[in-house]
Amino acid sequence: MSDQKKAKDYSHYFDFSDARIISEDDEKKVVKIKGRDITIYDQPNYRSGRKRKREEVQVIRPDHIVPSELANLGKGKKFLIRTYGCQMNVHDSENMSGMLLEMGFEETTETSEADVILLNTCAIRENAENKVFGEIGHLKPLKLEKPELIIGVCGCMSQEESVVSRILQKHQHIDLIFGTHNIHRLPTLLQGAIFGKEMVVEVWSKEGDVVENMPRKRQNKTQAWVNIMYGCDKFCTYCIVPYTRGKERSRLPEDIINEVRDLARQGYKEVTLLGQNVNAYGKDLPGDYGGLGELMDAIHKIDIPRVRFTTSHPRDFDDHLIEVLAQGGNLVEHIHLPVQHGNTEILKLMGRKYSREQYVTLASKIKKAIPNASFTTDLIVGFPNETDEQFEDMLTLVEEMQFDAAFTYIYSPREGTPAARMEDNVPMETKKKRLARLNALVNSISEKRNLDYQDQVVEVLVEGESKKNPDVLAGRTRTNRLVNFVGPKSVIGEIVYIQVTEAKTWSLNGKMIETAEVRV
């Protein structure tokens, strides 16, 4: 038996006895489960996903992601993509939409109209997975009513062994499962699901190469997401991302710069550079590339009003990046720097590899260089072994840092991570009480920080109508504060000046003064 076939051991993958092998070769395995054929090209495997070999990542530039013979596969059909999770998932959905449109499909927002439904999933927390499985259950009656409907599950949840196993056992109405590393394979996989009338599974545990020239249907014409790198090598003990997104791989700087220049030519007002660990950019590139600081310095010279980036890790926030960001111009004054906790011992258990004191020193350095910047973070309560005293350290850190805002979470174990093997010994009731105290403090500081904007004139990029009132417009300042105001719909997508009339805890209300003259 070849090494390749030895590696594809599915015995742990199925924990039911009625699975019957129909056929098997080096490319795929076909099994019958509960009366349905399932074609498995590849499976998620945590052990494989943990490996970080020093292999050179290739940049692949296919002329056509969608094979010519599949260009009309979707003619007369409609698709719907439901996206869960982070901006990276939103960006992946834009790529999938682009491919489906090139295949002749039309986009719809109505579930009942769709011929293809894709659930682009998030695995970061248990609650996110529960939402997806709830939606999978809700779609079963529609599949029974409309057997030709293709339902696919993709994204980070698909990279989890237990998730795929659960779908195969419990959710036979799913037609397609693929992961985060082989999105470019969607046209071919979808063809197999449509014509084969069998469930198709292809989830790569190894991340593969960087694929350029992906078709893309961006969500709007004002703000754009630009991937600059993929994956994460930090392996924080609570985090599933290194397994679902693979090792760190940077795009070439010239590809990124050309994409941003093209967006500027199209009239986009804001670009957000994306990466699971965005400020590790360039470390894997050959030669002595200067990293995110050098890339941001180059993008600083491009004629686009606003440039952001997310999400960064304190260990990779170097002095050169701070120096570049301090130039201002189109590099906006908003720093999101997740700390996760305020106690050094808990940070050590989390595998963050910095102390509270080191974080404070870095944050102070950034604040000194960019004194008008807003500063936001992520915080987790109830990590295993967290004591009352250690939680108090988190509260004192929030007081010391005076964060403008924070994303706060209760710890939930993720299968396959080191923390999941720790005893989850903080009672849920205690976790909830701690979260409530933390949120009360974060909100009070946020309200106080927002009061600094009272009666000030701020520059706002208008994103669209307010979610709460279609007669009110909403947008964000350079410091990422939400501003609501009354104005003509014609300014949507434009930069305007707003005088703040009311400062609230999570947003600002104001009145429009004038349209801004773009200055870069």
Image (spheres, helix red, strand yellow):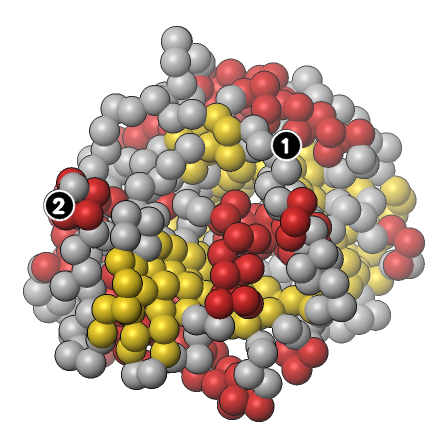
Viewport quadrant of the N terminus:
top left
58 over 334 or under it: above or below: above
Q: Quadrant of residue 167?
A: bottom left
Q: Position of residue 373 (x, y in %)?
A: 55, 36
Q: Position of residue 64 (x, y in %)?
A: 63, 37
Q: Residue furthest top?
A: 288
372 over 195 or under it: above or below: above
* Residue 1: assigned label: 2
Between disc 1 and disc 2, whose residue precedes? 2
Q: Nearer the viewer, residue 262 or 318?
A: 262
Q: Residue at x 58, y 32 (%)?
A: 62
Q: Nearer the viewer, residue 372 or 420?
A: 420
Q: Residue at x 65, y 67 (%)?
A: 79
Left or right relative to 418: residue 405: right
Q: Nearer the viewer, residue 423 or 187?
A: 187
Viewer can see residue 217:
yes
Q: Residue at x 16, y 41 (%)?
A: 2
Comparing marks 1 and 2, which lies closer to the viewer?
A: 2
In this rendering, the count of numbered labels is 2
Viewport quadrant of the C terminus:
top right
Q: Position of residue 22 (x, y in %)?
A: 28, 68
465 over 260 or under it: above or below: below
Q: Nearer the viewer, residue 26 or 344?
A: 26
Callout 1 amino acid: Asp
Viewer can see residue 357:
no
The CA span between labels 1 and 2 is 37 Å
* Residue 63: assigned label: 1
Left or right relative to 309: residue 39: left
Q: Position of residue 156 (x, y in %)?
A: 39, 56
Left or right relative to 459: residue 128: left
Callout 2 amino acid: Met
Secondary structure beneath dot 2 equals loop
